[in-house]
Image (spheres, helix red, strand yellow):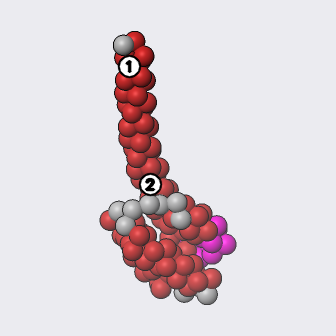
Amino acid sequence: MNIIKITLLSLSMAANFGLCSVTAMAAETTASSSVGVSETISHLEKALVEIAKSDFNTAQVHLKAARTSGEKITGNETIVKQAGALVIQGQIKAKLGDIKAASEELNKAISLYKSL
């Protein structure tokens, strides 16, 4: 009888621990995704400021950081891919010195990231 009680107790404890760890991991993923979105938006806004000043070298640094943090974002994959493509297009246009087009692309990317 004691063996049955001990077995049932250890099985229930193992199941409880498994459920708690899955819940904690899901909460951690959501928190890291929101941090990634805000970090990406921050870098894009800093890049926009630098592009407006025609400081394209500093803007490129922020755009690279935005692309790196954007790769860590989870959520709607379609929106994340579209926003990433817009950041790449903005980066290309900033390298070419096209302030207006780069700003438009990056503003579109920011609005997509904010929708997440």
**Residue at (43, 80) in percent of width and height:** 104
> Dot 2: within a 10 Å radius of its alpha carbon, few (fewer than 14), some, or many (20 or more) residues?
some
- The magenta-colored residue range is 52-61
Q: Position of residue 85 (x, y in %)?
A: 49, 79
- Judge left or right: residue 84 versus residue 19: right
Tell me the kind of residue under disc 2.
Ser
Q: Nearer the viewer, residue 87 or 82?
A: 82
Residue 116 picture quarter? bottom left
Amino acid marked by disc 1: Ile
Q: Residue 4, labelled with which disc?
A: 1
Q: Secondary structure at mark 1?
A: helix
The quarter holding residue 110 reads: bottom left
55 is within the stretch colored magenta: yes
Give how far across and how far down residue 53 sits, in percent. 56, 72
Residue 56 in view here: yes
Residue most toward the top? 2
- What residue is disc 2 on? 33
Q: Main secondary structure of the magenta part?
A: helix
Q: Residues within 10 Å of mark 1 (few under 14, many from 20)?
A: few
Whether residue 90 is visible: no
Judged by depth in the image, the label closer to the viewer, 2 or 1, is 1
Q: Is residue 14 left or right of residue 99?
A: left
Quadrant where the image shows the N terminus: top left
> Residue placed at 51% from the left, 64% from the top?
70
Choose between 19 and 50: the one closer to the eye.
Answer: 19
Give x and y (percent) for residue 7. Answer: 42, 22
Q: Find residue 75 and report its image quarter.
A: bottom left
Is 109 located above or below residue 15 in the figure? below
Relative placement, left or right, of 24 versus 98 is left
